[in-house]
Image (spheres, rainbow, N blue to C red):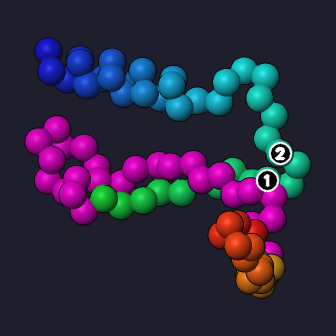
Amino acid sequence: MRSNAVAVMLAGLSIAMSKPAGTVPAPDSTLVDRVVYGRSLEGNRLGETPERKVAIYLPPRHGEKPEPFRARPRTEEGRC
């Protein structure tokens, strides 16, 4: 019974995390699939693997050299 509840919960979670119909990623953005290892999941009672597949969204300018930080002068009100 418990495994059925877990299966239903995981199915619902995967549906909730899926991309809504009609969405279009930003130009030059990337979706990367990776496998992460969770030490906290080692030896769990369900016997599931501690490895999880995750999708990582990288925005269009990811990996480029960032612009240097520039301090802005403050006004008397404390705002820039």
Residue position for label 1: 29
Looking at the picture, which amino acid does disc 1 mark? Ser
Q: Within 10 angstroms of label 1, few (less than 14), some, or many (20 or more) residues?
A: few
Tell me how far mark 2 sits from mark 1, CA to CA: 5 Å
Q: Position of residue 15 (x, y in %)?
A: 51, 23
Residue 74 - label:
none
Q: Position of residue 14 (x, y in %)?
A: 47, 29
Residue 47 forms part of the magenta stretch: yes
SS of the residue under disc 2: loop
Q: From this viewpoint, which residue is outermost toward the right?
A: 27
Image point 51% across, 25% down: which residue?
16
Say left or right for 39 vs 21. Answer: left
Q: Quadrant of the C terminus?
A: bottom right
Q: Position of residue 75 (x, y in %)?
A: 74, 73
In this view, the residue in front, 76 or 37, is 76
Q: Does residue 47 lie above or below 35 as drawn?
A: above
- Would you say the residues marked 2 and 1 are in contact, meaning their CB atoms lie under 8 Å apart? yes
Residue 63 visible from this viewpoint: no
Question: What span is in magenta?
Answer: 39-64
Q: From this viewpoint, which residue is outermost toward the left?
A: 45
Image point 15% across, 47% down: which residue?
44
Residue 15 visible from this viewpoint: yes
Image point 50% across, 49% down: which residue?
54
Residue position for label 2: 26
